[in-house]
Amino acid sequence: MSVDVLMRELAALGPADQRKMIAYLLTLRDEHDLERKRRLAAKINEKDLSKFATLEDLDRRFGLAEDPPSA
């Protein structure tokens, strides 16, 4: 099967199946990247809470923060 055929098949999938395929392809890409695995593990194991963003910080960063109610 050619890449062009795969791409047409993927385009025909629904959004949920496309997300699954994206996740699968990212997993394949990273499967043998030991340095990436090491860096990710270090971030997961981080204990210094000052390096974490709150959900509110992320909402502000991505422009999703709700405006405060007007008085």
Image (tube, grey):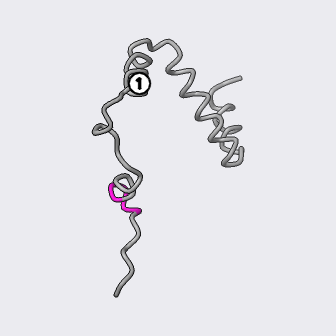
Q: Residue at label 1?
A: 45
Span shown in magenta: 60-64
User: Is residue 8 positioned above or below 57 on the image?
Assistant: above
Magenta-drawn stretch contains 63: yes
Q: Position of residue 36 (x, y in %)?
A: 41, 19
Apparent side of residue 30 relative to residue 24 in the rendered image (left or right):
left
Q: From this viewpoint, which residue is outermost toward the bottom?
A: 71
Viewer-closest of 59 and 23: 59
Q: Is residue 49 above or below residue 35?
A: below
**Which quadrant: the C terminus?**
bottom left
Most prominent secondary structure in the magenta stretch? loop
> What residue is shown at x 43% (from left), y 12% (from top)?
34
Q: Quadrant of residue 69?
A: bottom left
Lateral position of residue 29 relative to residue 42, left or right: right
7 or 22: nearer the viewer: 22
Q: Is residue 44 magenta?
A: no
Q: Could you tell me how many numbered marks the image carries?
A: 1
Residue 33, position in %: x, y?
Answer: 45, 14
* Quadrant holding the N terminus: top right
Q: Quadrant of residue 46?
A: top left
Q: Write the residue at 59% across / 33% down.
A: 23
- Residue 11 in picture, x, y percent from top left: 66, 43
With respect to residue 23, does 66 lie above or below? below
Q: Position of residue 25 (x, y in %)?
A: 58, 27
In which quadrant of the rendered view does residue 4 lie? top right
Please tell me which residue is depicted at 41% across the width and 24% down the height of the picture: 45
Local crowd at mark 1 within 10 Å, few (<14), some, or many (≥20)? few
- Mark 1 lies on a secondary structure that is loop
Q: Amino acid at mark 1?
A: Asn
Q: Residue at x 30, y 32 (%)?
A: 48
Front residue of 35/65: it is 65
